Amino acid sequence: METGYSAAQLRAAASAAVRAPSLHNTQPWRFRLRDGAVEVLADPARRLPMTDPSGWGVRIACGAALFNLRLAFAVAGAPASVRLRPDPAEPDLLARLRPDMPRRPTPAEESLYAAIPRRFSNRAPFWPDPVPADARWRLAEAARAEQCWLELLIGVGAVAAFAEIARGAHRVLERDPNRRAERDEWVRSTPAPDGVPAAAGGPRNEPHDLLPARGFGGRDRAPGRDFEPEPLVAVLGSAGNTAVDQVVAGQALQRVLLTATDAGLSASMLSQAIEVPSARDQLRLSLGRFGTPQMVLRLGYGQPGRPTPRRPVDEVLDLPVPRS
């Protein structure tokens, strides 16, 4: 068994970890090497006070980054044992990874790891091609593998019921000028290492659209490019809603997203119904599931795109100072 991870191992794994999704691409994580363990920390300076007052979004994002770290270490032959929230006195410390028994990576780990640089949020309209049953099964199994559940909304009635909840939540959020201003601060019209590039923001919502969309890009859509009338919508949920549950859900989210990418699917996230507490309760009751909804995904086949930029890895690392 390895005695600990090195700075070189952390730097290599962190280059994959930073490819995780986050609200408005804020990238609210740090990675610390201490006594041979790699620690994942929330970066409170990058929390969105208006959009994410509880820190839920930060913990989801850090959980997704943690899953990428786990994959990177596993593919390198140095898998990690993970302990979540290991120190109650340090609430921003979300996970500690120590080397486990060395082994060869599994084919599934290699496939998911290869999908990391290809995953991105696709906010454009998807093609009408249905998602086949075997892909849907793989997505549900991905969530289950991380102790979460994924409810696929099947049928016009189920999707319409969710859409009503989501549109109501969207209206609540859009009525808050502080939230709108905070969102606009993270839209990038020129190249930047964080935030959402305006070109990746998707087209402007139209009144007849079934699902709401945030106004990142504000572009008019091309003629004939209406959003799909029957999208595949999936709700990801966890057993509870503690800080640990949210980190667990972040890991499940990333496994689902990478599984979708590996299957040739595109995805975007619809978190409005999660951000408004009353809407989240409505969603939970409508599903009849035990636990707490943590994210909503829109899935389908879409046009090619590219991932949004990331900050340099060294900006998010805390490494020991070498002894002289």
Image (spheres, rainbow, N blue to C red):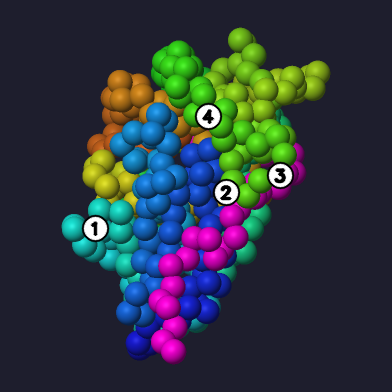
User: Horizontal and vertical percent for residue 41?
Assistant: 37, 58
Q: Which residue is mark 1?
A: 90
Quarter of the image for the N terminus: give it. Answer: bottom left
Q: Is residue 303 magenta?
A: yes
Q: Main secondary structure of the magenta part?
A: loop
Dot placed on the residue nearer the N-terminal end, 3 or 2: 3
- Inspect the image, locate mark 1, and give the three-letter code of the amino acid beneath it: Glu
| Distance in Å between CA atoms under marks 3 and 1 | 35 Å
- Inspect the image, locate mark 4, and give the three-letter code of the amino acid beneath it: Arg
| Distance in Å between CA atoms under marks 1 and 4 | 29 Å
- What range of the chain is rendered magenta? 297-324
Q: Secondary structure at mark 2?
A: helix
Q: Which mark is residue 191?
A: 3
Q: Secondary structure at mark 1?
A: loop
User: Horizontal and vertical percent for residue 315?
Assistant: 53, 61
Dot placed on the residue nearer the N-terminal end, 2 or 1: 1
- Inspect the image, locate mark 3, and give the three-letter code of the amino acid beneath it: Pro
Dot placed on the residue nearer the N-terminal end, 1 or 4: 1
Identity of the residue furthest to the top in this view: 207
Q: Which mark is residue 260?
A: 2
Tell me what residue is drawn at x 34 percent, y 75 percent: 34
Q: Which residue is mark 4?
A: 183
Q: How many marks?
A: 4
Can you tell which of label 2 and label 4 is closer to the viewer?
4
| Distance in Å between CA atoms under marks 2 and 4 | 27 Å
| Distance in Å between CA atoms under marks 4 and 3 | 17 Å
Q: Callout 1: few (<14), some (14-19), or many (20+) C-alpha neighbours within 10 Å?
A: few
Q: Callout 3: few (<14), some (14-19), or many (20+) C-alpha neighbours within 10 Å?
A: few
Dot placed on the residue nearer the N-terminal end, 4 or 3: 4
